[in-house]
């Protein structure tokens, strides 16, 4: 803590000690003021300007120091200065004093509170930045809320000082008027409780509710303005139309049908979206085949003298397609039709906030009316504009599944989850793989040590991982495909036979009528916390909405989109992203939920780290997978979990226990007290909790316990 803070604390503490030590509060009582009222009024008549100035400064000091007595001083203002001048003096003095208290709180405690409770304050800060003035105004209108508490609490938030002052000035005016007016009749008042009758308190509560009602009216008028250029149908054929049948679209339609709404699901390609057809399912299928080959390669580790596998890459890719076909019924039109969803194969275009123009794949046009729309059109691989890329040819995560011949030299552009998973898989089939990443490491969302462990494993398996390499151009020389990259100012030339572009994904935004409706888009569709677009009845969910591009978060968003679309304005829910897990299915498998060390440092969030090395776990040793670790970040001195990173076999499965714990406020102590089956990989979760407990053992108490046992031994 710096010198200025210490000095301010000393001054404030001195003033407060003096106030209570010398019982200065007796001068701020109704009885004392009544006894001195005639003398004070005489002094005011003799020196009106000086009396007003001293009263103003005293009032500022009392409110600035958050001392009791402001209410009595407000009454005194009415008694001594009358209604008009009393109201004028108190109104400005109270706002100025409140602002001083606000600034003192901000100067002394804001940084500490924001750092200490960063994860909780994030949502509060967002709300204050969005509607802080409105919240403050509502609180100021209701005297039931102690104003000095409001001053101090608001100082801990990012609310602007200017906003705090003028909102306080306006918001406290009604309450100030009541007290000043009561002060003009001070002789009839025996206590402060007599001022605010139940009826008056009820009036203030209604006054406090008024801004909420007004806001609803303003929101309704704003929505009406948005819809002004559109003609709303008198009735609707459907409650909901969902555009896109990926994870978000399917779940949205499922929920709507489950609550007996009439819902139509439109998909122009295949149901199941990227996850089923080109993403999660095929990638995990090929990873499983590649993993089998890696185990055969490692046969001596398991006591097998020799083992080999004869395979054709085309057969592997056919197996991938069989897996897709096996899973396909889960997302089929037949299943969803049985659930009560109207499934239509075709292209959809929103032509008004309540109308969708449909072009069926079988031919034919029609317009469908609906009360609400959910856009769940997903995303596609992003292809960067690198010179020569089209000439050399490439595959993406959408088209790589069409390969039937294993490339001899496979170049992977990108170091994210998709690029890493396919890099390792193709290398295990025997391709000579080179992975090129423009950044300083692969898997940049993870901690550096995690990236390094994966890179070490990749290189041990013969993969060339080239970081800090910027792709500049592709050329064909003498019939050979070459990437020209730049590394630390030097040109690097990399020859290859096939190229996978895996540098990220883009939302599918074109062709759905968004521009014509004026729906704001950037990398994704702009939505509010309820997943609403510019038009309150049009929602977006999944990859097209962001901020995460995972199948499970798309399904998570779908619940909010469906419920809000069907039940707003009666009830709606703000999407909750507080506990989002994910995994990258390389070896060693990497899974995470919540904060890692990199993010905690960037956000200045205090944390403690507890680790457990999976190389020490009995089951991991028996399985020949004794590598990796679990790293848990907790609040300093407490067992509350801020985030977990797992690197090791089945990390994506092991993380589930921590997702549950974080979602429901379960700490490491309770995980330690939970029985885990022996021998399993899940025991690692208990052991890391044990390490935390050991690090926080009460040493002084244990010393006394040791003496107790020594005494019992005699």
Image (spheres, grey):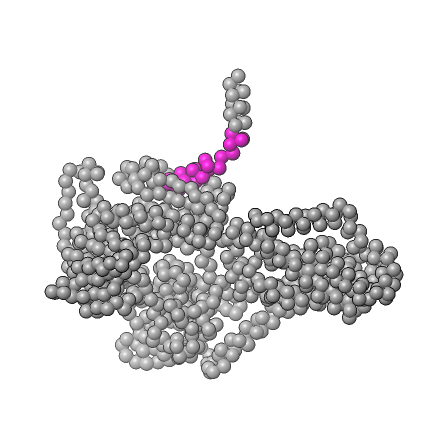
Query: Picture coordinates of residue 323 (x, y %)?
Result: 24, 57
Residue 415 visible in the snapshot = no
Residue in the foreground of this view, choosing between 499 and 266: 499
| Main SS of residues in magenta | helix
Q: Quadrant of residue 38?
A: bottom right
Taking the spot 70% from the left edge, 66% from the top edge, the residue there is 92
Taking the spot 70% from the left edge, 47% from the top edge, the residue there is 14
Report the residue that reaches farthest toward the left. Answer: 478
In the displayed structure, would residue 411 be above or below residue 708?
below
**Magenta region:** 682-702
Residue in the foreground of this view, choosing between 696 and 684: 696
Taking the spot 21% from the left edge, 44% from the top edge, the residue there is 295
Residue in the foreground of this view, choosing between 434 and 614: 434
Query: Picture coordinates of residue 348 (x, y %)?
Result: 35, 75
Residue 511 visible in the snapshot = yes
Residue 12, magenta (yes or no) = no
Compared across the picture, whether 325 is left or right of 506 comes to left
Q: Quadrant of residue 237?
A: bottom left
Label total for image: 0
Residue 684, magenta (yes or no) = yes
Query: Picture coordinates of residue 564 (x, y %)?
Result: 47, 66
Compared across the picture, whether 693 is left or right of 496 comes to right
Taking the spot 60% from the left edge, 58% from the top edge, the residue there is 154
Query: Picture coordinates of residue 206 (x, y %)?
Result: 67, 67
């Amino acid at each position: 803590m710096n010198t200025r803070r210490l000095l301010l604390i000393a001054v404030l503490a001195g003033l407060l000690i003096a106030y209570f030590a010398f019982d200065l509060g007796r001068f701020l009582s109704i009885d004392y003021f009544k006894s001195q009222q005639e003398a004070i009024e005489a002094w005011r008549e003799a020196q009106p300007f000086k009396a007003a100035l001293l009263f103003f400064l005293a009032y500022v000091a009392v409110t600035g120091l958050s001392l009791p007595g402001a209410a009595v001083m407000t009454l005194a203002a009415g008694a001594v200065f009358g209604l008009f001048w009393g109201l004028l003096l108190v109104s400005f003095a109270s706002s100025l004093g409140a602002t001083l208290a606000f600034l003192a709180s901000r100067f002394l405690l804001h940084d500490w509170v924001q750092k200490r409770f960063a994860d909780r304050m994030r949502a509060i800060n967002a709300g204050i930045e969005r509607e802080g003035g409105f919240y403050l105004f509502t609180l100021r209108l209701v005297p039931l809320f102690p104003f000095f508490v409001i001053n101090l609490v608001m100082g801990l938030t990012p609310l602007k000082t200017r906003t705090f002052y003028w909102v306080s000035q306006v918001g406290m005016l009604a309450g100030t008027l009541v007290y000043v007016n009561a002060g003009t009749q001070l002789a009839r008042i025996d206590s402060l409780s007599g001022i605010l009758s139940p009826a008056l308190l009820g009036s203030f509560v209604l006054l406090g509710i008024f801004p909420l009602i007004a806001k609803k009216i303003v929101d309704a008028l704003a929505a009406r303005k948005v819809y002004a250029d559109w003609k709303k149908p008198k009735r609707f054929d459907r409650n909901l139309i969902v555009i896109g049948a990926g994870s978000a679209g399917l779940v949205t339609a499922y929920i709507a049908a489950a609550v007996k709404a009439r819902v139509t699901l439109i998909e122009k390609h295949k149901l199941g979206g990227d996850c089923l057809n080109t993403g999660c399912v095929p990638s995990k299928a090929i990873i499983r085949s590649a993993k089998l080959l890696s185990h055969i390669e490692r046969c001596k580790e398991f006591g097998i003298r020799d083992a080999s596998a004869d395979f054709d890459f085309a057969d592997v890719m056919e197996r991938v397609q069989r897996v897709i076909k096996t899973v396909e019924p889960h997302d089929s039109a037949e299943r969803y039709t049985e659930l009560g969803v109207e499934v239509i194969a075709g292209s959809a275009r929103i032509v008004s906030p309540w109308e969708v123009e449909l072009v069926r794949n079988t031919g034919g046009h029609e317009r469908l009316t609906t009360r609400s729309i959910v856009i769940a059109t997903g995303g596609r691989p992003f292809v960067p504009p690198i010179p020569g890329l089209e000439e050399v040819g490439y595959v993406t995560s959408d088209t790589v599944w069409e390969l039937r011949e294993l490339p001899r030299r496979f170049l992977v552009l990108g170091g994210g989850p998709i690029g890493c998973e396919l890099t390792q898989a193709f290398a295990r089939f025997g391709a000579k793989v080179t992975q090129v990443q423009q950044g300083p490491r692969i898997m940049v969302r993870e901690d550096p040590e995690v990236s390094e462990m994966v890179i070490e494993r990749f290189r041990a398996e013969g993969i060339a991982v080239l970081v800090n390499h910027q792709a500049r151009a592709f050329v064909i020389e003498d019939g050979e495909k070459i990437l020209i990259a730049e590394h630390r100012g030097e040109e690097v030339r990399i020859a290859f036979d096939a190229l996978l572009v895996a540098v990220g994904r883009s939302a599918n935004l074109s062709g759905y009528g968004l521009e014509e409706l004026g729906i704001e888009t950037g990398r994704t569709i702009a939505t509010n916390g309820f997943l609403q677009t510019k038009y309150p009845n049009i929602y977006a969910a999944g990859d097209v909405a962001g901020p995460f591009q995972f199948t499970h978060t798309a399904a998570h968003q779908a619940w909010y989109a469906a419920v809000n679309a069907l039940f707003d304005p009666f009830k709606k829910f703000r999407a909750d992203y507080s506990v989002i897990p994910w995994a990258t299915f390389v070896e060693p498998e990497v899974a995470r939920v919540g904060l890692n060390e990199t993010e905690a440092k960037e956000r200045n969030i205090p944390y403690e780290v507890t680790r457990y090395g999976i190389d020490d776990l009995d089951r991991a040793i028996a399985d020949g997978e004794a590598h990796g670790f679990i790293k848990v970040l907790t609040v300093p001195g407490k067992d509350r979990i801020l985030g977990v990173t797992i690197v090791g076999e089945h990390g994506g499965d092991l993380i589930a226990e921590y997702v549950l714990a974080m979602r429901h406020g379960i700490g490491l102590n309770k995980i330690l007290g939970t029985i885990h089956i022996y021998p399993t990989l899940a025991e690692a979760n208990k052991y890391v909790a044990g390490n935390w407990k050991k690090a926080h053992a009460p040493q002084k108490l244990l010393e006394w316990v040791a003496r107790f046992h020594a005494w019992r031994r005699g």
